[in-house]
Image (spheres, rainbow, N blue to C red):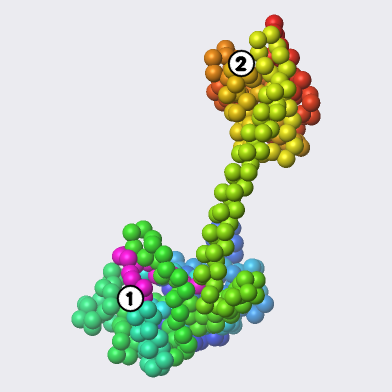
Amino acid sequence: MTERLYYHDPYLREFDATLLDTVSYDGQTALVLDRTAFYPTSGGQPHDVGSFHDVRVLDVIDIDDDRILHVVDRAPSTTALHGTIDWTRRFDHLCGVPTESFHLGTEYSTIDLARDVTAGEIAGAEEEANRIVWENRPVAIRFASAEDAASLGLRKESRREGTLRLIDVEGFDRSACGGTHVSRTGAIGVIAVSSTERFKGGSRITFLCGGRALHGFRSLRDVVAASVRVLSVMPSELPAAIERLQSDAKEQRRQLKDSQERLAAHEADALADAAASFGSLKLVTAGLPGWDVAGIKTIASRIVERPAHVAVLLSEPAPSSIVIARSAGLALDSGAILKALIAKHGGKGGGRAELAQGGGITAPAADVLQSARELLKPGA
């Protein structure tokens, strides 16, 4: 059994311990000590890292038999160990907010709530949390049996049995928790909600504390400053400026689509007018530089609005997209023609008798189109 020093002193940065055993955990070396100040991943709080002299601690794991494994980069040369906690990381994690269900991450933390919450409710909770922080209330640690704890007004009933570790924020909150905590609420500094979203029928609240809140503010400040420079507006005018940009972009996309459709119609008519005659069949085969598959599909569809027409069109340069289409009433299978061309020249694709499309063709467009003409000529 490993004595958990962090239960009594979450500010303990260094400690001495005796190595009891060295084991293998997922192919890595792990140490079992008689006592430790290293906190294992638990209850949403990430594990500590640090070192034993020149041996690095990479992970800390709580095992069911009350042992704590310290995953290290190599085995130490002595059984008398002096452990040092990475205090910058630990203190950042101390600044998490106790709550019913949360994830404490490296850059931000989240709380998942069972229902939707309003902006007013979130703002009210944020104000109240910061009031408790700024009042710098003491945070005490005590131990009690599960029976005694049930009568102490815990924020959330604990499912654990035996002796419970209780965290008491003076005059505000009492909960069962095995994690590390600040000794006074003022050490948290500030709590800032950065975003909210719907999540699994409820709400996910993302928040920042302590140093992470400062880093988050700096990041937001830099993004806003860069945005106002680019858009030449004041910060308060950013939402309206972005809406105008979105509206302008939507209108430009509409105009571009209209222009492309008119250009496609002009291109299709020119190609159809120059179609080669194969008996009663009118065949259009062409490579079209600068057109994507959607564009050549539009062109091919307009060509085959004319009776007795077949269109085989490729985009250029390679790798090329290909579209094959035929007029209604023709006894030709565009999908079968595409399959034959792919078998000879590579690529992939498929489709129906009236229209097929593919892509990834690296062969010269002239070779592919010549093969198409040979497949479609009478008697082939």
Picture quarter with the N terminus: bottom left
User: Residue 17: x percent and y percent?
Assistant: 54, 81
Which quadrant of the figure has residue 332? top right
Residue type beneath disc 2: Ala
> Closer to us: mark 2 or mark 1?
2
Residue 37 part of the magenta-drawn span: no
Residue at the location (63% across, 26% down)? 303
In front here: 264 or 127? 264
Which residue position is annotated with label 2?
A: 308
Give the magenta range: 108-122
Which quadrant of the figure has residue 234? bottom right
User: Residue 133: x percent and y percent?
Assistant: 41, 88
Residue 112 part of the magenta-drawn span: yes
Picture quarter with the C terminus: top right
Position of 184 compared to 233: left or right?
left
Say the numbered circle drawn on residue 121: 1
Q: Is residue 16 visible?
A: no
User: Residue 10: x percent and y percent?
Assistant: 46, 84
Residue at the location (65% across, 36% down)? 264
Position of 164 compared to 302: left or right?
left
Q: Report helix, strand or loop for mark 1.
A: helix
